Image (cartoon, rainbow, N blue to C red):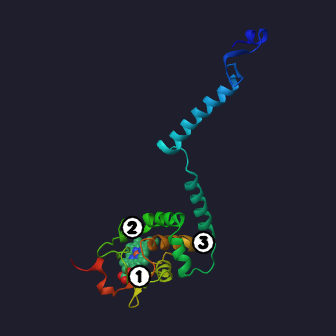
Amino acid sequence: MTEDQDRDSQPVIMPHSYDGIQEYDQSLPNWWLFTLFGSMAFAFLYWMACFVTETAADDRVTLNAELDALEARQLAAVKNLDDATLWKMSRNTQTVAEGQAVYNSLCFTCHAPNLAGIKGLGFRLNDDLWVHGNTPTAIFNNISEGITFEGKPTGMAAQKVLGTGRIAAVTAFLLSTQKEGSMKTALRKDEPSQLNP
Ligand code: HEC
């Protein structure tokens, strides 16, 4: 119905009548149609972005990342690092990522990029066998202070200059390959990555 008709005429009444009830013959208002088709288009685009192409940020992913960052900051502020805190750090993706970055810049040359160790250079770090202490704090101290054997320094030099935060992070990265409660001790002469094949 155009605006002219609107002004000139009364609404047309449909010819049928049911139980005495009659019906106007009116077109739906444009604002109403706009809302209807607009919400359909929005629903389609929303569905595409969230469930088909998945280009829209997932709220749960964003929230988890923020909670992780918050926990990482809280853990980094802990003054007395103990085993429990280091295990917690090893389950925090941000701390582990920070530790992995340290590993990839400093440690991979002797311990191999995949932590498998390099014969004659550095021990394997991703198996459950530990020569110089099988607890998170022992690993932290080995990295921080370096390792001596029978009074002589080994290839593992002190990394104190990294600072507590980054040493804790790289410890957390190593621990992320371990299972709590199943880290075993091994004799230095039995370290698998250093044995002859
Ligand atoms: C110059 C080579 C070298 C570099 C670089 C190096 N390490 Fe080592 N690392 C060694 C050697 C060699 C040993 C074994 C010590 C020994 O001979 O008993 C070792 C041992 C260790 C151990 C003890 C393993 C065990 O079984 O108890 C840890 C943990 C470790 N390194 C972590 C690191 C981390 C983390 C970094 C980087 C910040 C790093 N290392 C950098 C050579 C290196």
What is the secondary structure assignment of the residue under circle 1? loop
Q: Residues within 10 Å of mark 2 (few under 14, many from 20)?
A: some
Q: Determine whether the beta carbon of the residue marked 2 sits less than 8 angstroms from the nearest atom of ligand 1.
A: no
Q: Position of residue 38 (x, y in %)?
A: 62, 31
Q: Can you give x and y, in whole percent of width and height, for residue 39 in the image?
A: 62, 34
Say whether disc 2 or disc 3 marks the residue closer to the N-terminus: 3
Residue 196 placement: quadrant: bottom left
Q: Which secondary structure, mark 3?
A: helix
Quadrant assignment for ligand 1: bottom left
Does 57 sit above or below residue 27?
A: below
Separation of disc 2 and disc 3 at Cα?
A: 25 Å
Question: Which residue is disc 3 drawn over?
Answer: 75
* Residue 24 horizontal side relative to residue 136, left or right: right
**Where is mark 2, residue-wise?**
108
Q: Kindly identify the amino acid type of the residue bearing the numbered disc 3.
A: Leu
For the residues labelled 2 and 1, the Cα–Cα distance comes to 21 Å
Dot 1 corresponds to which residue?
Answer: 183
Query: What x and y, as percent, mark residue 59?
Result: 58, 52
